[in-house]
Image (spheres, rainbow, N blue to C red):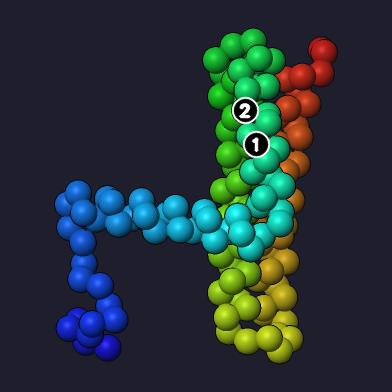
Amino acid sequence: MSSIDPRIPPKQVGFARIVAATRYSIEGLRACYQSEEAFRIESVIALILTPVAFFVGETRVEIVLLLLAMVLVLLVELLNSAIESVVDRTGSEFHILSKKAKDIGSAAVFISLLFFLLIWGLILLPN
């Protein structure tokens, strides 16, 4: 497609680019929230635990670690959902590489959840 194709929006520059990028990001969050149950669950948990992090964290570093662990889970879940969408777009038939991509994305979410549990456990459990 050429750059004058009406289906392709013109490249945004300056502040308009920031506004457009923000809009696309919000659309991505909305799409993931609407279509991915795991992201919805993790988002609700993050909303509940965010104020808890400020209450149980004894130092700023602890608070940041607690929040970082939650944000990491959400980020990895977003990336995993993007990978799954691209794989699903390519076709519904089974392919070993599609399975591999989805399994690796799932493993990334699993590792982020283990990190979350480790951080929260180390901070919340008594020495």
Secondary structure under the numbered disc 1 in the rendered image:
helix
Q: Residues within 10 Å of mark 2 (few under 14, many from 20)?
A: some
Q: How many marks?
A: 2
Pick the front one: 35 or 89: 35
Residue that numbered label 2 is attached to: 50
Q: Residue 116 or 97: which is nearer the viewer?
A: 116
What is the C-alpha distance between the residues marked 2 and 1? 6 Å
Closer to the camera in the image, 88 or 97: 88
Check if mark 2's residue and mark 1's residue have beta carbons within 8 Å.
yes
Q: Amino acid at mark 2?
A: Thr
**Left/right of residue 79 with respect to residue 124 in the rendered view:** left
Q: Is residue 102 above or below residue 69?
A: below
* Residue 31 position within the rendered picture, expressed as x and y whole percent measured from the top left: 54, 61
| Residue 32: percent from left, percent from top | 58, 58
Q: Does the image show residue 111?
A: no
Secondary structure of residue under mark 2? helix
User: Residue 37, how many percent across, how many down?
Assistant: 71, 57
The image shows residue 119 at horizontal and vertical percentages of: 70, 29
Vertical relation: 95 (above or below) 60: below
Residue 7: which quarter of the image? bottom left
For the C terminus, give its image quadrant.
top right
Residue at image coords 69%, 45%: 42
Q: Is residue 75 above or below residue 95?
A: above
- Left or right: residue 115 versus residue 75 is right
Amino acid type indicated by mark 1: Ala
Can you identify the residue that label 1 sits on? 46
Residue at x 39%, y 58% (from the top left corner) = 24
Q: Residue at x 75, y 32 (%)?
A: 118
**Does 38 sit above or below residue 89?**
above
